[in-house]
Amino acid sequence: MKFKKTVKYLGIGLAALLVVAVLGLFAWSKTSTYPARDVALATLESGEGVAVSQDQWITFTPEEGTDIGLIFYPGGLVEPAAYAPVLRQIAAQEVLVVITPMPLNLAIFNTGAADAVIQAHPEISTWILAGHSLGGAAASIYAESNPDRIAGLALWDSYPPDSSDLSDNDLPVLSIYGTTDGIPNTDNFDAKRDLLPAGTEFAALEGASHAQFGDYGPQKGDVLPTLSLADQHQRVTEIMLDFIEQQ
C-alpha cells in the first residue's frame, strides 16, 4: 500500500514539474521573442497587387493568381511578421507566399508545418521551402524527409543540422548568407557546406547582418551591418526571385 502511494505521489510530482517546465518555456519564449518592427508592419496591409491575410498563417496572395508558392519558416524567437518586407516583394511577382508561425516561435517544434500549407493550396503545382536561421534548419529537416513535395530549398543565413544531410540529394538548394571581409558571419557555416548538395547555389551578401534578413532590430551576437536594411532586403528579394524562376 505504501509503495502504491509513493508511486502515486511521485507521478503527481513529475506531472507538476512538467507543467511548470512547459509554462516556464512558454513564458521564456514570449519574453525573448524579437518583435516585428515598423518596416515589416507597414507591409502587412493589402494593396498594390497583393492581398494579405493573417489567420492560421500570414499569407501574401498575388491578385493575378499563380501556380508557384513559397513557404517560409521564421527564425528562432523571431515574430513571423518580421519577414514580411522581403516576402511581400516576392509575392508581388506572382508567387503565393505563406509564413508559418511556429510553436513558441521555434520552428524545430513543427518541422512539418509545410504539409498543411500544401494541402490547403491544391492550385499550387510548384512549392519552394525557405527558412531563416533555425527556420532554415527546420526547413532542411522537412526537405530531407520530403524531397518530392518541394521543388527547391532556400536557406537564409542557415545550414542543415547534422541529422539532415542533403549532400546526396538532387534537390535545388539556395544558400544566402552574410559576410564580413569575405568571411561568413555565421559560425561553422563553411564547415557545414558538405551537408548540402554539390550543386547548391551560394550567394554571399557582403556587409549583411543576420537580423536584417527580417526587420526585428539588433540581435545579440550579430555583426554590425554595413549594408542598409533596405538594400539587404532588395538583394535577398532579387536572389530569391531568380532562384524561384529557375524551378
Image: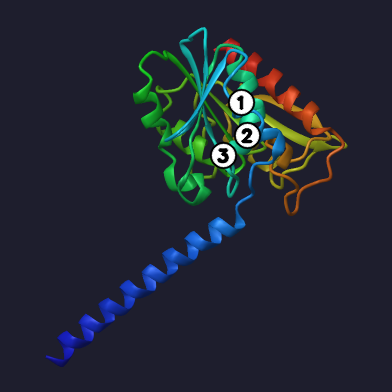
Measured along the vertical axis of the image, is residue 84 above or below residue 111? Answer: above
As drawn, the label of residue 87 is 1
Q: Can you tell which quarter of the image residue 185 is in?
A: top right
Left or right, 219 with respect to 95, comes to right
- The residue at the point 66 percent across, 26 percent down is 86
Q: Secondary structure at mark 1?
A: helix
Q: Can you tell which quarter of the image residue 230 is in?
A: top right
Distance of label 3 from label 1 (alpha carbons):
11 Å
Q: Amino acid at mark 3?
A: Pro
Measured along the vertical axis of the image, is residue 121 above or below residue 5? Answer: above
The colour scheme of the drawn protein is rainbow
Left or right, 177 with respect to 149, comes to right
Q: Amino acid at mark 2?
A: Tyr
Query: First in sequence: mark 3 or mark 1?
Result: 3
The residue beneath circle 3 is 80
The residue beneath circle 2 is 83
**Residue 26 in view of the camera:** yes
Measured along the vertical axis of the image, is residue 84 above or below residue 217? Answer: above
Instruction: Tell which residue pokes out farthest to the bottom in this image.
Output: 2
- The residue at the point 64 percent across, 49 percent down is 34
- The residue at the point 58 percent across, 32 percent down is 196
Distance of label 2 from label 3 (alpha carbons):
6 Å
Evaluate if marks 2 and 3 touch, with contact meaning CB atoms under 8 Å apart. yes
